[in-house]
Image (cartoon, grey):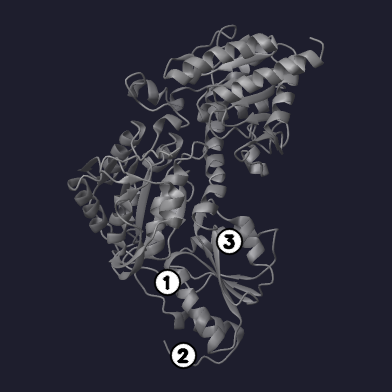
Amino acid sequence: MAELGPSGYSPYPVAMYEGVLTPPPGKALMFNEIVDEEIAMREAAKAMLTRDNPTIFPGPQVLYAWNEEAKEKAKLVRKIAETLGAKIIPMYDYRPKYPKIDPEKEINPNHPNLTIWHNNIKACIFVGVHCHYANVALKIIRAETDCFTIALCGNSGHEDAMITLRDQHLEELEKFIKVAEQVKKELGK
Amino acid sequence: MQKTEQVQYNRAGQRVVSPDYLLFEAPREKQFMTGSEVVKEAVKRASVDASVSYPITPQSEAAHLIGELWVEGYVGVYFRGESEFGVMSEIAGCAMAGARTITTTSGPGTLRAMENFPMWAGSRLPIQLVLMARGVNSPLSIQPDNLEVSFLLDTGCMIWHAETAQELFDMILAGFVVAEQPDVHVPIITVVDGFFISHTREAVMLPPDDIALPPYNPYKAPMPPIDMEMSPGRFLRDPYVMKSNYISYATHASWQFEVRAAIERSRPYAKHYLRGLIEEFGDPEGEIVFVASGTAAAQAKEATQILIHEEGVKARVVRIKTIRPFPAQEVIEALRGAKYVFVPEFNVIGWLERELRRVLYGNLDVPVIGSPRVAGGMTMPPEFIVKEVLQFLGKEVKHVV
């Protein structure tokens, strides 16, 4: 992600148009910089531990028992939330919800800003959200809010998030928990 | 301890190999084939799940040959649609269900199916369309002409333009691999100039036919595939046009930006599998530069040889392999030092010239000459291109066309 805020006439900036690519395998993206995975994990944990109302938005890939990995990932997501002292608000369905969502309980990729505004969320993690919907939501969040966005992606990552970690499977999520515990200790929390 | 290797086979009993092995490492044998036959050979090695066809010149034979692959067990599902609109809708259904899909069309068929191409892109379906270009009804033509490419430029699909049957073979295989990357996952249109490639025979190097690409994994798709838990009705979502409020506009805007961003994300993958988004040919110091794609590039290469060896004119070709994404940075770099840029094209409007002018504007100050340009089935002999350049330079024209 290159810069905060709207781009040109459109309220929906696209980091890709600013020349920011998803990170290569084994690396992570922090704003517009390609960094080692551990550095990004530390900064992600720090953002979640120091900003107001940190929240995890788990998507269908960890909310439903599609396969064994999904079940195990779900347990780790809960553990991440406990470690970071974060709330969990699920993105369980991608269809736009009308007339309105209940922002206390849910987030929707088509209007994610409503949940973030309502709960005054200043840092969030996307995990288990299908890539297209994560990208649609992250662009809107970037344009409409001042929320610090982190993507823990099982595929190639999301350049519109402020920190993106790619290929995040069980081993990587366990590593993130360890890094978060360490950062928490360092911050005296 | 003895190492055990797990060998995977696809539905046709072909050994599954990595895309890199199939494209770059597997031994190849020389064959003499038409472009249509080459489509069959590529599909045969691509673990394709479904193909839908409809006859229109000049792609009918390629579509027919994919049907033969279905009979032989290489393609899972194959049927004829009711029209091109039907074909492109039905192939979308197959792709939404998680199938690797390919179809073919030409000329007016492309326009008849038009509404579907942005729908494919918006639904993030990695469908492959082999477009054997022939122009559109302006008036009716069944001759070589690639006017229809201009209509496809902003549909949200990737567009690659092959120069030869060999490149078509490789692009079809690479096309699936790039289009199915989770962060790309948009349709791929592989274009060849009809008749010049589809109906003429040339030497092609093919890997063995008992190996194939890994099957498509729809569970890595950026949208949920349809299955027993995700029914079509659920997948298709509320159409945003039915809602008139700020939220629906906002979503639609972000969604469309995301589709375009997805095309941009294909660059590193395409660069790897196509060995670069452009090809440079001729005298590296050439001041006369042809920017061209497809058959026009092949003819420009011939013209370049004549200009260098018979006319003493330093010339070169910058061949564009990917129209979407357009290799803007690569082209700007390649054109540094050029004195004049010629854009030979097989269509009346000069869509490549427009694309080139767009990326050069404000970046590189070099005269662009949208010529020579032929249409409606005219050929473009190399001598024709040479004559154009020599006349422009005020030199004597020895060749008579």
- The local secondary structure at tag 3 comes to helix
Q: CA distance from mark 1 to mark 2?
A: 19 Å
Residue B330 vs B152, above or below: the answer is below
Disc 2 on helix, strand or loop?
loop
Q: CA distance from mark 1 to mark 3?
A: 18 Å
Residue that carries the numbered disc 3 in the rendered image: B356
Mark toward the start of the polypeptide (3 vs 2): 3
Depth check: give the residue in front, B211 or B320. B211
Residue B395, compared with residue A35, is above or below; it is below
Up/down of B338 relative to B8, above or below: below
Tell me: A145 left or right of A154. Answer: right
Q: Which mark is residue B399?
A: 2
Can you give x and y, in whole percent of width and height, for residue B285 in the image?
A: 65, 76
Of the residues under marks 1 and 3, which one precedes in the sequence?
A: 3
Q: Give the labeled residue for mark 1.
A: B374
Outermost residue toward the left? B71
Give x and y (percent) for residue B360: 64, 60
Amino acid carrying label 2: it is His
Q: Position of residue A157 (x, y in %)?
A: 59, 33
User: Of helix, strand and loop, which one carries label 1?
Assistant: loop
A20 with respect to A168 (left or right): right
Q: From mark 3 to mark 2, how far is it between C-alphas?
A: 29 Å
Q: Which mark is residue A183?
A: none
- Nearest-to-viewer mark from 1 and 2: 2
Marks 3 and 2 on same chain = yes
Q: In the image, are marks 1 and 3 on the same chain?
A: yes
* Residue at image location 65% in from the left, 24% down from the top: A150
Q: Which quarter shows the N terminus of chain A?
A: top right
User: In this orientation, does residue B165 appear?
Assistant: yes
